[in-house]
């Protein structure tokens, strides 16, 4: 579904991503792991069209998208829930969700999707008129995921959905990601919490200073000594 080929991305003279290749097959959850500054966010922002690669290609469903503007990439079926959530704190839950549907004109379908979001996250439905900034970190993360789902993406990219969350809330979010997969959404996940991410993932890629150093199934990476030492804190 998504094919990233020899992708390189720079900020001025700083090369943040140094020629990486990976694929995401339809129906999978794929994780990008790596320490701070490895290039994970840069990779997602490039797939979204927010950054342009200096070389390499991004193909979505067989078509090159690395020169397509970000708003068109959303209409092609890719949604991005960014790091730090980027909600509008003074706007209501419902208005934040509606912003996620800004590329759509089908009012009835949008209403259906709002109802689906409220069914998935009852707390959002019960407090739909309240300002997003009044919600807990975990609830705001739910809202960020729900907002990304409002464009009806076939590929959902999530940047650090467990950031700042308690272990219980992290489990809730991970269970939600598994449910989204079960309902047919393909997911590209960036996570610091390697344990939680790999447990869900069909495949994982480890990024170190802009290069992929390891890739395998989620299950195999959970057992890998290098991953266990560096990312799972196991001796
Ligand atoms: P984190 O988990 O800390 O967000 P990351 O793996 O997502 O890390 P990136 O945010 O992609 O990493 O950053 C990759 C590299 O690019 C880092 O060295 C970072 O300092 C640099 N970088 C990121 N954004 C910019 C920018 N706007 N200008 C210059 N350098 C940047």
Image (cartoon, grey):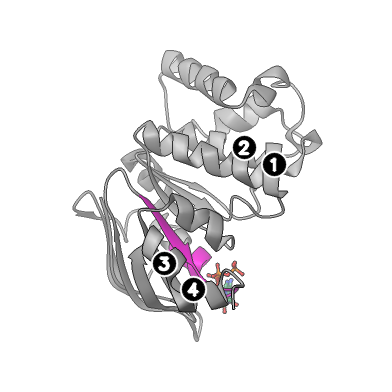
Q: Bin the neighbour count of mark 1 within 10 Å (Cα to Cα): few under 14, some 14-19, many 20 and up.
A: many
Q: Which residue is mark 1?
A: 138
Q: Position of residue 34 (x, y in %)?
A: 52, 71
| Figure quarter occupied by ligand 1 | bottom right
Tell me if residue 207 comes above or below residue 110 in the rendering: below
Which of pointers 4 and 3 lies earlier in the amino acid sequence?
A: 3
Q: Bin the neighbour count of mark 2 within 10 Å (Cα to Cα): few under 14, some 14-19, many 20 and up.
A: many
Q: Nearer the viewer, mark 3 or mark 2?
A: 3
Give how far apart the Cα atoms at labels 2 and 1 are. Answer: 6 Å
Q: Which residue is mark 2?
A: 142
Label 4 with label 3: CB-CB less than 8 Å: yes
Label 3 with label 1: CB-CB less than 8 Å: no
Give how far apart the Cα atoms at labels 1 and 4 are. Answer: 27 Å
Q: Quadrant of residue 88?
A: top right
Q: Position of residue 110 (x, y in %)?
A: 47, 20
* Magenta-drawn segment: 29-43
Label 2 with label 1: CB-CB less than 8 Å: yes
Label 2 sits on a secondary structure element that is helix
């Amino acid at each position: 579904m998504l094919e990233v080929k020899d992708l390189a991305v720079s900020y001025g003279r700083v090369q943040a991503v140094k020629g990486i290749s990976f694929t995401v097959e339809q129906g999978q959850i794929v994780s990008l792991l790596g320490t701070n500054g490895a290039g994970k966010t840069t990779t997602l922002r490039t797939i979204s069209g927010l950054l342009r690669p200096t070389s390499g290609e991004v193909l979505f469903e067989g078509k090159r998208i690395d020169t397509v503007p970000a708003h068109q990439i959303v209409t092609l079926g890719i949604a991005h829930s960014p790091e730090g959530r980027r909600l509008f704190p003074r706007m209501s839950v419902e208005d934040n969700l509606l912003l996620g549907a800004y590329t759509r004109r089908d009012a009835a379908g949008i209403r259906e999707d709002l109802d689906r979001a409220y069914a998935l996250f009852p707390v959002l439905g019960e407090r739909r008129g309240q300002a997003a900034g009044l919600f807990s970190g975990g609830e705001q993360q739910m809202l960020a995921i729900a907002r990304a789902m409002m464009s009806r993406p076939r590929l959902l990219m999530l940047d650090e959905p467990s950031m700042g969350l308690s272990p219980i809330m992290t489990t809730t979010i991970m269970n939600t990601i598994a449910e989204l997969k079960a309902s047919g959404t393909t997911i590209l996940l960036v996570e610091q919490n390697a344990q939680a991410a790999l447990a869900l993932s069909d495949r994982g890629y480890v990024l170190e200073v802009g290069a992929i150093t390891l890739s395998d199934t989620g299950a195999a990476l959970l057992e890998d000594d290098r991953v266990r030492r560096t990312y799972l804190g196991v001796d």
